Image (tube, grey):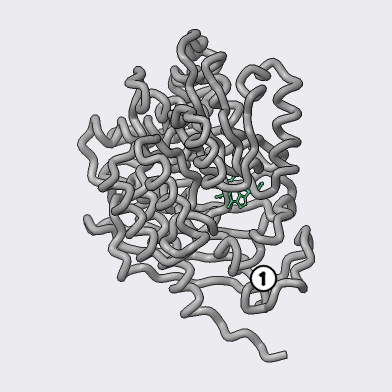
Amino acid sequence: MIPHRTIATTASAPDAMFSHPPPEPGSDFNVVMIGAGNIMFGSDEGPWNHSFRFEHKLGPRLKVVALIDPSTARADKVLEGKRQSFVESAYKDTKVFKTIEDYHASVQSKHSPTPHAIVVGCPPAYRGGTTKGTDLELHLIKLFPKTAYFIEKPVGTGTVKAAKEVTQELISNGNIVSVGYMLRYLRCVQKMKQIIHDNNLTIMATNARYSAAYEAIAKPAWWNKAIDMGPVIEQGTHFCDLSRYFGGDVDINTVNALSVEFYEKPGKLSKIPIDESKIPPELRIPRLTTAHWKYENGAVGSLTHAVALQGHAYACELEVWADGYHMRLVDPYQAPTLFVRRPGDDHEERHVYTDDDPFFSEVSSFIDAIEGGPDPHILSSFEDATKTYELTWAIRLASEASRAPMPQA
Ligand SMILES: NC(=O)c1ccc[n+]([C@@H]2O[C@H](COP(=O)([O-])OP(=O)(O)OC[C@H]3O[C@@H](n4cnc5c(N)ncnc54)[C@H](O)[C@@H]3O)[C@@H](O)[C@H]2O)c1
């Protein structure tokens, strides 16, 4: 085994949340949150929790003026918790609404100011589309045309064509929009970008491997292709997006994919935490998907997404090659580490940034973009995120076209 040459790059992330300057007092920053679920308020599933990052970025300036969720009981419950904590001032006047239209009517009738930001964390089925019930962004543009939007991934669950139409509407309306591909903000990822830039590298290939710990995924929607659209569109999207961040635009016509399906022997899983028999067979998710494609510059990309691990921790790794260079991003969720091999040296460097919080960095950049703060770089636009959505759909469709036929009952 090649020994690692550990160079002195175990450093605290310069924009780590704890070393960020404490929020200064100032005028209120009014935020509307859409969705009172895990991404917005946290859960045992992972480190995501947007409210926590907004609180730390804005401190006493944060005023969550509205929380929108058709499940008002869930919204009331999270607010109750916040109001009993030290961030009470951000939530003491939060109003719960079932729809954004109800909130808009309240703003009109009370002549309240429009919010500075709307954070969208509802399920993707309600957004990114052009038909009734899927067209949240189009409503937002009409009701709050000047507000900045932070929108979770994936951009939707409808057609790619519809997502592209929404993209055009957002571009022509000119809002500040950030999409939640937070891995782009990891210090290791930015280090990779810097190495590519400093050495004027042309990427030759990317290879992404994403292994989910399926035993801990207890949401029936995730296991049903009709709701969350399958694990590549819902989850592997993060690594498709990172691949594109390095490889550039994909020639969609070159996407090929194969899958292991639930009805094949290697696809038998012993610890599925939901009752999969309630999901019609044709809507059950593949256990493994492997895909490859050409980027428009001629480089090659590949992805393996596996629904195979048990326990809680995911195992994810992204490799990027260029002439003389091999970069490996390892474990971006738990302990992000970057290994780099460069020309003139057979050893690998190892780069570690402690206390790196990409969720905080993406929220911080979003707010800086709104307020002209020190780091206003939004790394994921809706247009770019729609290209990732297109790639993930191409992978799903290619794997479905090539899969082994399901045995007849
Ligand atoms: N970036 C990440 O790492 C990450 C992590 C988790 C979730 N997500 C994304 O966040 C989104 C939400 O996921 P989640 O885990 O919070 O789901 P969740 O099911 O925990 O919460 C979603 C909430 O939205 C509410 N809701 C449903 N319809 C709504 C509507 N029309 N308007 C407003 N609210 C509505 C639901 O009642 C629920 O409370 C998904 O797109 C998911 O992919 C991203």
Among all residues in the image, which is located at the extreme front?
109
Callout 1 environment at 10 Å: few (<14), some (14 to 19), or many (20+)? some
Residue 64 % position (x, y): 57, 28
Look at 52% across and 47% down and name the residue there. Answer: 101
Total numbered circles: 1
Side of 174 relative to 115 (left or right)? left
Residue ID for mark 1? 267
Residue toward you, 314 or 24: 24
Residue toward you, 341 or 232: 232
Residue toward you, 62 or 194: 62
Look at 61% across and 34% down and name the residue there. Answer: 49
Q: Quadrant of residue 275?
A: bottom right
Q: Quadrant of residue 178?
A: top left
Look at the image and tell me whether residue 350 can be seen.
no
Screen quadrant of the C terminus: bottom right
Side of 123 relative to 350 (left or right)? right
Residue 280 % position (x, y): 69, 77
Name the amino acid type tagged 1: Gly
Among all residues in the image, which is located at the extreme bottom?
408
Ligand 1 within 8 Å of disc 1? The answer is no
Residue 375 % position (x, y): 35, 22
Look at 37% across and 54% down and name the residue there. Answer: 386
52 lies above or below 42 = above
Look at 70% across and 48% down and name the residue there. Answer: 71
Side of 392 relative to 387 (left or right)? right
Look at the image and tell me whether residue 116 can be seen.
yes
Where disc 1 sits, the SS reads helix
Side of 225 relative to 237 (left or right)? right
330 lies above or below 386 = above
Residue 258 % position (x, y): 49, 72
